[in-house]
Amino acid sequence: MSNESLANLLKEERRFAPPAALAEQANVTAEAYEQARADRLGFWAEQARRLSWHTEPTQTLDWSNPPFAKWFADGRLNVAYNCVDRHVENGLGDRVALHFEGEPGDTRSITYAQLQSEVSRAANALLELGVRPGDRVAIYLPMIPEAVVSMLACARIGAPHSVVFGGFSADALATRIKDADARVVITADGGFRRGKPSALKPAVDEALTRPGTEDVRSVLVVRRTGQEDIAWTEGRDLWWHDLVDRQSDRHVPEAFDAEHPLFILYTSGTTGKPKGILHTSGGYLTQISYTHHAVFDLKPESDVFWCTADVGWVTGHSYIVYGPLSNGATEVLYEGTPDTPHRGRWWEIVQKYGVTVLYTAPTAIRAAMKWGDDIPAGFDLSSLRVLGSVGEPINPEAWVWYREHIGGGRTPVVDTWWQTETGGIMISPLPGVTATKPGSAQVPIPGIAATVVDDEAREVPNGSGGYLVLTEPWPSMLRTIWGDDQRFLDTYWSRFEGRYFAGDGAKKDDDGDIWLLGRVDDVMLVSGHNISTTEVESALVSHPRVAEAAVVGATDPQTTQAICAFVILRGDEDASADESALVEELRAHVAKQLGPIAKPKRILPVAELPKTRSGKIMRRLLRDVAEQRTLGDVTTLTDSSVMDLIQAKLPAAP
Ligand code: ATP
Ligand code: MG
């Protein structure tokens, strides 16, 4: 970004007060902000008491060697015990922990008592394989209960897990196995996706032929799809049902230091090469448990929680596994895609299990908008009481659609900003406290300090934009990049002295609320003005014909960069006939919404946009297209043929 701070173009006046009944019974009230402001560390020390410690911590934060933080350093606990056993000991053994829904329609409901047995057996199995505290275990599984069980089994024996998304290739898996030097891989024959079995084991076999993966001694294989022709390496490969099922269902959890590594997880790779983010135990679990309780107002005795993320992403780690289970919640785990066998599958699941709190991503909301309002309208969604969003800035129109068509116009929508690096939610409304604004994550949660600064690290006044920074350490912060302390320092701590640089652009509105404006790498410079891709995209999406938009700045001789927009049109109407008239209408629409400076030079209707496997738009590839360059790294792209289609549509530069 240049010296001029980010232009503040978008105006959004809609406000939604918390429903009175929810506010009255809310888990967290406005008082929490006061309390945390008065004594931030005391506040977190109190939240740590949500957990059950083997040795209670007497220290809260050790910041003597910044930015390497230690939280609750003299405390000892077992993370899996906190997520499973203690609920059973508290008489909740019969409560359902997981309602599993397989894509083909098979289901399993697993109580906390059953989860305790399964996790204990899996822990005993890993011990039999020689896994010791500190050894890394790679997990490459579909969204089946064994994924959750494996993660908890690792946590239980102090073996950090590295979960690799089941949609990734052998290459991506091999790099991650090698980087973390994993000893064991837990996988499955395959999973179900889009109505068919999709194999996983061959990718593991291939990955393990790559140099640097030799330390993998054992591959534990869950039978999920029952495909028959599966290759087998004797002495290395073992069936889960052979090894795990014969183990004792008793395992006494050992306590580990609060700073014992819990997992390594690689970022999505939206802006570049993925980074192996290291999270530890006590601080992580404290913040994840607290944020799940506070941001979703989770009432474990009555709520049914559903986070639609994959466990391969941080959202799945924190808000499928560690948050809900540490709070003793009942939750849904769904294996498949939202449109198999039909486009109402998610809403059918909400109706079937009476889901009360739904947490999903803008990409899914925009897809549902595109498919049409009548689809969710065909299901009973009245059980829902809180809706959440994560992963990208949510366009105000998508936010309003979500509240209206999924939330029946009743539910608060919490737009939660955070990253793999932050471990848990950092900026979000609280559903019983905050009057929400469509498109804004608004305020740091109690105990978190964030602000927006300019190039010179000065805090910007309300009404201006700049860089999002976190100004105080937080319990679930990353401890380093695995094996690369220098990259940790360079990436996050060198841009602004003593502050964590998130890499995202943001602005503060007139009330001081925070709006996320996309990656700093994506900010455009047009005739001396910094313009946010997010704002131009939101302006496009506010036009009734636009379902999705991705905006990039392409090098331009006159204006430094020119705004180039790729849009997916809504509905089934044939766009080709009136395409050029529509493009003109959309350019005028953006100019009217944001001002003439933000008017796109070019708008290209396309069928699909390039997205990471976690659903984020990859603008850097579109920039390559717009500037007619060779494409950069596409390994974390869902479907690389999308790029061929887009390139084919692009006329020669005018
Ligand atoms: P990489 O760092 O490798 O490029 P990534 O940043 O996509 O990958 P994640 O940690 O999964 O990997 O994503 C975090 C990013 O997602 C944030 O930095 C932010 O840009 C975006 N994000 C997440 N939630 C929100 C939100 N509610 N509003 C706006 N942006 C969000
Ligand atoms: Mg990132």
Image (cartoon, rainbow, N blue to C red):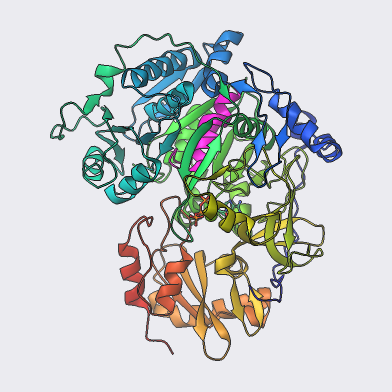
Q: Is residue 519 above or below residue 369?
A: below
> Is 458 within the magenta?
no
Q: Quadrant of the C terminus?
A: bottom left
Q: How far from the left and from the top, in percent, is residue 23?
A: 78, 34
**What residue appears at the point 49 percent right and 82 percent down from the top-left corner?**
581
Q: Is residue 654 above or below residue 67?
A: below
Residue 577 sits above or below residue 417 on the image = below
Tell me if residue 624 comes above or below residue 407 in the rendering.
Answer: below
- Residue 379 seen from this side: no
Q: Viewer-proximal residue, 360 or 618?
A: 618
- The residue at the point 73 percent across, 67 percent down is 454
In this image, 545 relative to 345: left or right? right
Q: Which stretch appears magenta?
A: 305-327
Q: Quadrant of the rendered structure where residue 498 is?
A: bottom right
Instruction: Point out residue 606 in the picture as x, y percentages from the top left corner.
Output: 40, 70
- Classify residue 118 by image quadrant: top left
Residue 273 on image: x %, y % = 43, 57
The stretch drawn in magenta includes residue 306: yes
Quadrant of image for the N terminus = bottom right
Q: Where is residue 317 shown, x and y percent of the image? A: 50, 36
Q: Nearer the viewer, residue 70 or 385?
A: 70
> Looking at this rendering, what residue extends furthest in the front direction?
65
Residue at 38%, 42% in the rendered image = 164
Q: Looking at the image, which is closer to me, 226 or 235?
A: 235
Quadrant of the rendered image containing residue 57: top right
Look at the image and tell me whether residue 36 can be seen. yes
